[in-house]
Amino acid sequence: MIYKSRVRKLLLITSALFLLCVSPCLLLTADARGKRSKTSSRGRAAKETRSRKSKKGDRSVVVKRQRGESRRAARRRAEAARLAAIARQRAIDEALRERVQTLIANDDLAGEDPEVRRVAVEALGKRAGTVVVMDPQTGRIYSIVNQEWALSEGFKPCSTIKLVTGLAGLSESVIDPSNPTTVSSHTGVELTKALAYSSNEYFQQVGGQVGFDKLISYARLLGLGERTGINAQNESAGRLPELKSGFALNRMSSHGDDFEVTAVQLATLVSAMGNGGRLLTPYIARTPQDEIRLQNRVRWRIDIDPDMWRYMVPGMVGAVNYGSGRRAYDPAQTVAGKTGTCIEEGKWVGLFTSYAPLANPRLAVVVIARGSDGRSHYPAAVAGRIYRELSGRFGTVNGLQLATRNLNHPDLDSEDDESDEIEATENQGQRKPWWGNSKVRRVLMPIPKKSDRNVTAPTPTPFSSAVQKRPRRVVSENRQSPR
């Protein structure tokens, strides 16, 4: 019994020792199994994730490839559309140019000056446009290239309407030449720069302050909306806008919205600016008798203070010397002009109206072009070629140049910073310039400031006096005065 009891104890002790030795191993094995299980699960999860990412990546690559192909196809379509639009525009331009060449071939050359005609035709070339060359002192028409357009076709004046807006603003004291920032929100922008660079905002503010009725009255006073009376058939009277206000009035003041002007009307308008306010009746001297009978016919004298004309001169000269009309520059003489470029009924229109020389104007040149030929100030280039080629005949020996400085404008180079006074000696037998002084400064503003004058400058003529004192008719007393 004692032996069995000891054997039993020994077995219990052995079993206990076995369990003590085997249990950690079992635990380690189970833990290893658990870790392997977890690792295996993570591996499978990672594998599945990689698989999903791979599939997603494949799909992303496919989508990117499709998007790239779509963008390339869109660019190809856009380029094809662009080329097609260019081809259509070229076809339209060529058709318009061919039509103009046909019209020019049908011009009546009776009374045309052969040299001026040749120069004007060559300057216009094969472009779609019209040219008027006129004597701003007598009203004689030297040449009209494309008479159909010049006489019968009405054009949107675009920025050339700013000549009317500027004169109205000066006469109505909206523009104060002694205070450059009166009507402009931009520091340093004043009438001269606004004209030279054709600032829309400036003239929109001026027109808005002048008002519709007064602005239209000045347009009538300058000959718009009425036939010039030229001795030619089928002349158009153009068109004046109907009542406008707000933004529409501002746009009308800067872009000429709803105006229609003819090239001959612009020629008489700019001639009046060059000769001191005489609105002439243009004429074609088909016979020697016409030259005697028709010259110097004054429709009316524009009742505007002479200072108002003078204040416009520096900006018009600046437009040609360094501004928007630089392509009309003539180194032999001073050209005063105004550019205009805008869209009319979906087509480009370009205009340039001008006179030269400044000291003794002998030519007024107006160029109007349509379509692509109306862009990039091509009309100014045509006028510039005419002035340069005819300067030997119509220019002055002393090439008086104004506004040769760039006024520190950021878009211009500053090669000439001189401010010398240039003596403008008049040739024997030439008329004295209407604007007076023979000495002018080469710094854009030949007009003396009010503070520098020994006498008080005349107060700008108010609009009411311009209406009450109708211009005196020189010829045709039975004709009605401008409305």
Image (cartoon, grey):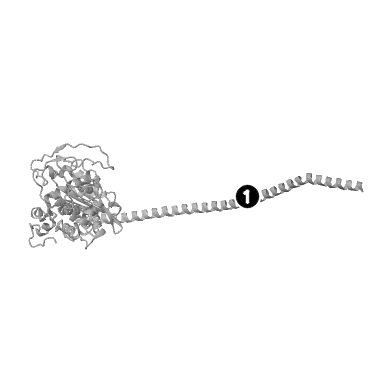
**The quarter of the displayed image where residue 240 is located:** bottom left
Q: Which residue type does callout 1 highlight?
A: Ala
| Horizontal and vertical percent position of residue 362 | 14, 47
Residue 15 visible from this viewpoint: yes
- What residue lies at 61% left-to-right and 50% top-to-bottom? 50
Decide: is 388 above or below 371.
Answer: above
Tell me if I can see residue 340 in this picture. no
Place of residue 22 in the rendered image (x, y in percent of width and height, measured from the top left): 78, 45
Q: Is residue 375 left or right of residue 28?
A: left
Q: Look at mark 1 in the image and give the residue it sits on.
A: 46
The number of numbered badges drawn on the structure is 1
Q: Position of residue 236 (x, y in %)?
A: 19, 60
The residue lying furthest to the front in this view is 2
Quick check: 217 left or right of 12? left
In this orientation, which residue lies closer to the viewer: 390 or 57? 57
Q: Residues within 10 Å of mark 1 (few under 14, many from 20)?
A: few
Q: Nearer the viewer, residue 234 or 169?
A: 169
Quadrant housing the C terminus: bottom left
- Residue 410 x/y as whole percent: 28, 42
Q: Is residue 385 left or right of residue 21?
A: left
